Amino acid sequence: MVDINDYLKNTGIGAGANRRKIDASGTVKLEGGATYWDDIAGPLSGAKLGSAAGSAAYNYNENSVEFAANGSITNANDRVFMSVQLPHGVKPDSLMKFHMHWEQTDAVVRTMTLRYRIQDNSEAKVTAWTTVAVDTDDSIYTYVSGTINNILPIVAIDLTGVGLSAVVQLQFTRTDGGTGVLAATSLDAHVERDQEGSDQEYVR
């Protein structure tokens, strides 16, 4: 007779290396391709918005942040910021894929710039930023007409060696010299999970 507890712990459910297991503590573990993707998001906030050039302003009626042209990532008046904490179930050494949700009203190419740094618990504070810039013509969906909801992939952050509950700090603005206003509705990340949470409170 097969011991179902032993089967779930040592063999699991799935095919080949892609399996769902339950360990002796009852924690579900996902192996191989049995992982899943999830969203992690935070609010787009700004303490000093409204410089003459490159302004970022809240549109309270539309729940969006409107970016004008000629912003600078180093100017606090031009940018918004957010911090997100890695969920306990994020797969170790995976990628954190940040992207912007935005309202596209034309086919004009605009540039969004993001900089980030990772604050890992028990490690020295990181003071340097990594900066990336991406054009809106790299968005997922093709613009045809009217106003569409689109997604712009921005950066895939390597989480190799990053520990449990690390904090990712981000600053974000528009930096092209074009025309019009770009309305962003969300900045969030896709993360890959290989278990529902950590086995312990402060260590995985």
Image (cartoon, rainbow, N blue to C red):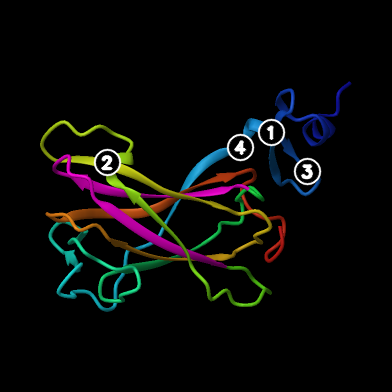
Query: Which residue is under mark 4?
Result: 35
Asked if the residue at tag 2 contacts the one at tag 3, i.e. Cβ–Cβ closer than 8 Å, the answer is no
Q: Residue at x 59, y 65 (%)?
A: 166
Query: Which residue is under mark 1?
Result: 32
Q: Nearer the viewer, mark 3 or mark 1?
A: 1
Specify the amino acid type for callout 3: Asp
Helix or strand or loop: what does disc 3 sit on? loop
Q: Residue at x 36, y 68 (%)?
A: 81
Q: Position of residue 147 (x, y in %)?
A: 14, 40
Magenta region, mostly helix, strand or loop?
Answer: strand
- Report the magenta residues as a range: 94-118
Helix or strand or loop: what does disc 2 sit on? strand
Q: Based on the picture, tell me whether residue 37 belongs to the magenta stretch.
A: no
Specify the amino acid type for callout 1: Gly
- Is 36 drawn above or below residue 101 in the view shown? above
Task: Compute the Cα span from label 4 to label 3.
Answer: 16 Å
Q: Residue at x 17, y 55 (%)?
A: 178
Asked if the residue at tag 1 contacts the one at tag 4, i.e. Cβ–Cβ closer than 8 Å, the answer is yes
Task: Compute the Cα span from label 4 to label 1.
Answer: 7 Å
Q: Position of residue 174 (x, y in %)?
A: 27, 60
Q: Quadrant of the N terminus?
A: top right
Q: Nearer the viewer, mark 2 or mark 4?
A: 2
Query: Which residue is under mark 3?
Result: 23
